[in-house]
Amino acid sequence: MLHWIWLLWLRGGEIATLAICLWALWRGGTPERIGALIILVGWALTDLLSPPNQGPGPWSIVVDIAALIAFAWLALWSRRPWTYFAAACQLNGVFSHFAHKFTTFGLYSYATTIALWSGYGLIICLAGGMIARRRDKKQQLSTGQNEILRS
């Protein structure tokens, strides 16, 4: 039973990440596209640099710190609310690396926490940004149409 839960957690996250990042690359504004690229590049580098079946390695920390810096820059540059939440999630992910190094935080707890903050947390923030962008575009279209009708 636990194997199926783990498989759902892992594969569900991969599918959700790909779907939301592709949506952001296709329909998002510049901040959403940059955010999707940060997530996808970080994901690819982590897979490439981490030792197989050993949990997050030392390069994962470097990649996550780079992603934190990128999301902090994106938040300051774009001023979109979702980017601040994404930077906070990534900060929690980085802190999780250090909690594991300096405490008795177990490997499974460590991997789950990293996946929660630096994985699911980031894609939820990006999805929230995409929903807000879509709502704003609808509002602009309806306001623009009303102005055309008034003139």
Image: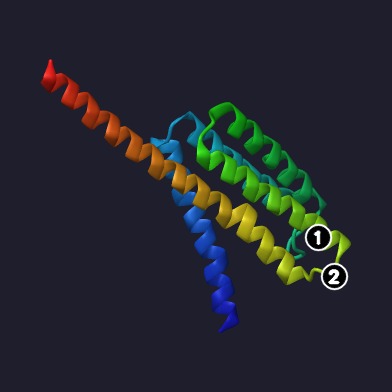
Picture coordinates of residue 87 (x, y %)? 63, 43
Residue for badge 2: 104
Amino acid type, callout 1: Ala
Amino acid type, callout 2: Thr
Q: Quadrant of residue 139?
A: top left
Picture coordinates of residue 82 (x, y %)? 52, 42
Q: What colour scheme governs how the chains and residues are painted in the rendered image of this protein? A: rainbow
Q: Is residue 12 above or below residue 121?
A: below
Question: Can you name the residue that lies furthest to the right here?
Answer: 102
In the image, what residue occupies the spot 59% across and 34% down?
A: 75
Residue 73 visible from this viewpoint: yes
Q: Is residue 46 above or below residue 33?
A: below
The quarter in which the N terminus is drawn is bottom right
Picture coordinates of residue 111 (x, y %)? 70, 64
Q: Is residue 76 above or below residue 111?
A: above
Residue 39 visible from this viewpoint: no
The quarter in which the C terminus is drawn is top left
Residue for badge 1: 99
| In this picture, residue 136 sits left or right of residue 24 | left
**Secondary structure category for the residue under label 1:** helix
In the image, what residue occupies the spot 12% across and 20% down?
A: 150
Question: Can you name the residue that lies furthest to the bottom here?
Answer: 1
In the image, what residue occupies the spot 23% across and 28% down?
A: 143
Q: Quadrant of residue 117?
A: bottom right
Q: Is residue 60 above or below residue 27?
A: below
Q: Residues within 10 Å of mark 1 (few under 14, many from 20)?
A: some
| In this picture, residue 117 sits left or right of residue 134 | right
In the image, what residue occupies the spot 77% across and 69% down?
A: 107
| In this picture, residue 95 sits left or right of residue 2 | right
Residue closest to the eye, 70 or 47: 70
Picture coordinates of residue 84 (x, y %)? 58, 41
